[in-house]
């Protein structure tokens, strides 16, 4: 697999592997033996960048994912990079069966978190350490100061912020240079594109989570798909609601047809779109082996055509039409002229994105 550089000197595989769904958020935790084998296959396929967090588990076993990666990736530690996160915890005082996650980024707790993560990951350093969510009670400058100390101590090599805006990034970066932000980004979720100029100015990379819109853009789900209400976040996500799925059936079929014209899967097509946007974007896949998505970067999307497509989309926005697939995929009820806009979008993509 090709590589990309985040920040000034953090080189990773062009596509990373997000490991959350193995233990958290996508139904019941998966079999440890199966996931251990999958992780080994991912390394063999060229993945070097793996993502976890200290809360990727269940309230009864909150650190399951870090423990899994620590054991499974130990044989490959000298040729991979691991990122994990701190700053949110399960609220065990809640009476709800699904314990909510609450922010807590007190400096003393960060130090306890990093030591515990190092132990669970069976490593002497964390390649990149993210603040998972902002804590309104703790200024980001205080967090950045702790990160600077941890870098000096060699416990972490880089640090980043997740779901962060431009102002917070600037404040943090002024105290301790940030290597990457990890924000939601896909054809369905493009609101962070307004941060791109700031990321380029500060030389900060973007690690994109949910590049498949939580699996929606793989075209593997339909209105009959069922998600566990107790353990699967997708149960309440708008793109998976039956009415939205029905409205967007034709659009998903178009994505499948266009991908097939390039001998690719919808997942590969979606990742190729993202990789063509900026050289400092690294998306995280959640299913690396099944469709050969490590070949994504080889799909031919020329920069000149990408730029022309972007200009057309910008002008389209001015006419009150949302240019991304995103909003339409959430359902036509909010956009009465959705079908006409989809036809326009199809023409733009076919005419200007691909050779």
Image (cartoon, rainbow, N blue to C red):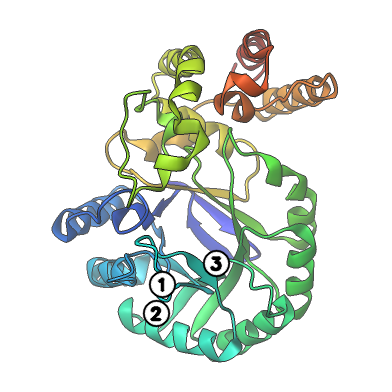
Give the mark nearer the N terminus: 1 vs 3: 1
Q: Under tag 1, what secondary structure? A: loop
Circle nearer the viewer, 1 or 2: 1
- How far apart marks 3 and 2 lie (CA) works out to 14 Å
Residue labelled with disc 1:
54
Tell me if residue 75 comes above or below residue 209 in the rendering. below
Residue to which mark 3 is pinned? 132
Q: Earlier in the sequence, mark 1 or mark 2?
A: 1
> Which residue bears the numbered disc 2?
117
Q: Quadrant of residue 32?
A: bottom left
* Residue 264 falls left or right of residue 314: left
Residue 23 x/y as whole percent: 30, 59
- The residue sitting at 61% across, 39% down in the picture is 189
* Quarter of image, res 236: top left
Residue at 66%, 39% in the rendered image: 190
Residues under numbered marks 1 and 2 in contact, where contact means CB atoms less than 8 Å apart: yes
Within 10 Å of the Cα at label 1, are there few (<14), some (14-19), or many (20+) other Cα atoms? Answer: many
């Amino acid at each position: 697999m090709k590589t990309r550089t985040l920040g000034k000197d953090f080189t990773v595989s062009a596509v990373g592997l997000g490991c959350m769904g193995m233990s958290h958020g996508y139904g019941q935790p998966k079999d440890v033996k199966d996931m251990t084998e999958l992780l080994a296959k991912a390394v063999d396929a060229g993945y070097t960048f793996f993502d976890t967090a200290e809360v990727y588990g269940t309230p009864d076993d909150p650190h399951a994912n870090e423990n899994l990666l620590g054991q499974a990736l130990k044989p490959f530690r000298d040729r991979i990079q691991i990122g994990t996160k701190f700053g949110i915890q399960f609220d065990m005082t809640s009476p709800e069966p699904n314990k909510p996650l609450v922010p807590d980024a007190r400096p003393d707790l960060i130090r306890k978190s990093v030591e515990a993560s190092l132990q669970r990951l069976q490593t002497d350093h964390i390649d990149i350490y993210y603040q998972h969510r902002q804590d309104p009670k703790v200024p980001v400058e205080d967090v950045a100061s702790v990160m600077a100390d941890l870098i000096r101590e060699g416990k972490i090599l880089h640090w980043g912020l997740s779901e962060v805006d431009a102002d917070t990034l600037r404040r943090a970066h002024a105290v301790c240079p940030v290597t990457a932000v990890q924000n939601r980004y896909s054809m369905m979720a493009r609101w962070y594109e307004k941060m791109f100029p700031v990321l380029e100015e500060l030389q900060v990379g973007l690690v994109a989570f949910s590049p498949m819109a939580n699996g929606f853009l793989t075209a593997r789900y339909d209105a009959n798909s069922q998600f566990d209400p107790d353990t699967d976040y997708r149960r309440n996500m708008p793109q998976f609601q039956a009415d939205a799925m029905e409205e967007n059936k034709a659009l998903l079929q178009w994505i499948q047809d266009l991908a097939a014209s390039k001998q690719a899967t919808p997942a590969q097509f979606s990742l190729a779109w993202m990789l063509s946007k900026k050289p400092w974007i690294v998306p995280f896949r959640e299913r690396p082996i099944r469709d050969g998505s490590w070949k994504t970067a080889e799909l031919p999307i020329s920069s000149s055509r990408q730029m022309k497509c972007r200009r057309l989309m910008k002008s389209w926005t001015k006419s009150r039409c949302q240019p991304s697939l995103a909003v339409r995929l959430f359902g036509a009820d909010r956009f009465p002229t959705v079908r006409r806009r989809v036809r326009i979008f199809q023409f733009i993509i076919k005419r200007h994105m691909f050779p």
